[in-house]
Every structure is written in structure tokens, then in C-alpha cells.
Image (cartoon, rainbow, N blue to C red):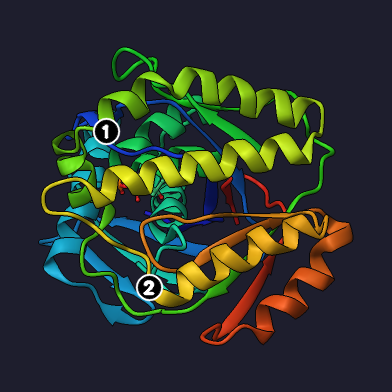
Amino acid sequence: MNPVTAIAHPNIALIKYWGNRDHTLRLPSNGSISMTLAGLETQTTVQFDSHLSADELFINGQKASKRASDRVSDLLNHIRSLANTHHLARVTSSSNFAIAAGIASSSAAFAALSVAAAQAAGLDLDTKTLSRIARRGSGSACRSLYGAFVEWFVGTDDADSFSQPLSIGKDWELMDLIALVDQSEKPYGSTRGHKIAESSPLQTARVSDTPRRLALCRAAIKDKDFELLCQIVELDSNLMHSVMQTSTPALLYWTPETVRIMQAVKSWQSEKLEVCYTIDAGPNVHCLCTPASANEVEHRLKKLPGVQEVILCAQGNGAHLL
Ligand code: DP6
């Protein structure tokens, strides 16, 4: 069978996904909204082969760990059941950015894998169905099926928890400047984090308030209201990290450099610079800004102690076949 290659970009959540109602299907505790990022990308090739005795996974030229291979095989098993095939697959994946350092590498990886594997298995699926498949691999991956602003619906079951592009704000060109302070693999990954979210007494309050934050985020995008977007994005990030920091075990992803950037962003806002911060499950800080403020924000970030690199991302496209 012919090899098939797909490309996907990571996304940054403006309203975050944290916690699952169903860990196997990755049905989230709350809906989320993201922006897909250009520049950073994962390219994945899948080839089903009747001669293989096990699935094979290579990441950036290296044979992958058993844990990563098992996770990929779980998704391939789902695709095999849909395609009614038993053939095993060779998967090679490469990314042009640090894996597992809180820049949402799994979102790009599982979006690319879903698109490539479905096509390689002979399935002709619409993007909504592909987003449901990607969701099983990594929740945030379901949002990388589309470009620009994307909403992932909390849903009630496997059929209605999928992502969809927001029909509004398509021409609002925001940028994400990722300030890298640490690129090592994080000690406590998102998958484990989702499983302990409920142990925080704050998670119930965070989840029940999500419809309000989603509505405010949609309104900010619709009206291109950067100030409102900043308020809601920072609040949402702070709420998620409050849950992380108060779960058992407590997850503190921030380092002194992370906090220094958060404080710098707050002081730049008081000078009317259009920028706000949001942080995923890692120490690196995503600074959202308007194109007009991007150069100044980049310049200032690079001067902060501990900032190793600043990656500039405009809005990216959805996952697609090469
Ligand atoms: C903090 O999608 O990485 O980035 O489903 O276990 O792969 P898994 O988790 P993942 O969780 C993302 C968490 C987050 C917030 C977000 O992207 O919404």
C-alpha cells in the first residue's frame, strides 16, 4: 500500500481544555477555543504493510519509546477497525520544534497522524470525523484539523465532541510569540494532568464557568476586541494553572522565568502595548499580540533574562495531505 504524508500545525488554546469526562475517548470536561499556529509543523508518513509484524514508529529519525508507540498503535487500531483492515503500519514523523515542552506538540502530531493514517487505510472521511479521530489520540489535536480560530465542543459523547472553525474573526491576524525558557521534556505530561484535574477543589468552578468564558472569547474574536481577548485569555490560563497547582499531586509548571515574563507582559499592557500571555502545561509563555505590536514585543521578550528563543507564529492552516 502506498505511503501517505500529512502536515499539521500545533494550536494554542485561548480557552483551555483541562480534565476529561472519559479518558479513553478523551471527552473533555469543558469546551475550548484555539488558534492554529503557522511555522511550527509536524510531517507524518503512514504506510500500511501486510509484511509487518508490529506497528513501527520513528520520531525525528529515532525509534520511538514504547509509550509513544503504544499511543500511536491505539489510534491506528481505531482507524483499522473503521477501515476493516488488519495490516500494521510504518509511521515516520518529524517536527521542526521541541517535543513535549508545552508548545502543544501532540496536537500537531495526532492531527497529522489521523489525516495520513485515514487516507493510507483507504478511508475517505470528512474533516469533522477526522477531528473526532484525532481527539482520541490527543484532545487538543482535534482543533489542529482546522486553521485560524477553532472551537472544540464539549459534546455529550463520541459523536458530538468534535471541532469546528469559528465562522467569525477569520481576517483577524493575531500573532503568537512563544518565549522559550526551557525546552526539556516536562516531568508531568498533559495526559496524566487531565487525570488528576478533578482532585483540585477548583476544577468544578473552572468547568462550570467555561460557557461564560467561551462566550466572551467568541465575542472578543467577533468584534476584534483585543483588550477583551486579553482579559479572558489570561483569566482562563490563570484558572487552569490554579487547578494544576491545587491538584494532588500539585503541578507547578511555572519557573521564575515564566513568572518574570508574565509580570513583564502586565507592565507592557499598562504602557498600552497590545500583548497578553497564556501558558500551557509547561514553563514556556505564549505571548499573543497584534501584528502592529509584534516587533516591539519580540524585541522586549528577547531582552528578558532566561528567554532562550522567541518563536514568531502567525495563524496557520488546518491539517492537510501533502
Ligand atoms: C494545557 O491535548 O496535550 O495544552 O489529550 O492527553 O494529549 P492529551 O492532552 P493535551 O492537553 C492539552 C492541554 C493544554 C490546554 C489545551 O491545549 O487546551
Q: Which amino acid does label 1 sit on?
A: Leu
**Residue 149 position in % (x across, y down):** 65, 37
- What's the residue at 41%, 68% (across, down)? 283
On screen, residue 21 above or below 57: above
Left or right of residue 83, residue 129 in this image:
right
**Residue 130 position in % (x across, y down):** 44, 33
- What's the residue at 30%, 74% (across, down)? 185
Any part of residue 241 in sight: yes
On screen, residue 277 above or below 311: above
62 vs 213, nearest the viewer: 213
**Residue 93 position in % (x across, y down):** 40, 67
79 vs 200, nearest the viewer: 200
Q: Is mark 1 on a helix, strand or loop?
A: loop
Query: For residue 258, which numbered disc appears in the image?
Result: none
Instruction: Quadrant for the N terminus, please.
Output: bottom left
- What's the residue at 57%, 50% (across, down)? 321
Left or right of residue 2, residue 233 in this image:
right
- What's the residue at 65%, 62% (across, down)? 265
Any part of residue 14 in sight: no
Q: What element carries label 2?
A: loop
Instruction: Quadrant for the C terminus, please.
Output: bottom right
Task: Report the residue marked by disc 1.
Answer: 202
**Residue 123 position in % (x across, y down):** 41, 33
Instruction: Kindly report the distance in space between the C-alpha atoms of the residues bearing marks 2 and 1.
Output: 22 Å
Query: For residue 255, which numbered disc appears in the image?
Result: 2
202 vs 161, nearest the viewer: 202
Left or right of residue 41, residue 59 in this image:
left
Q: What residue type is labelled 2?
A: Thr
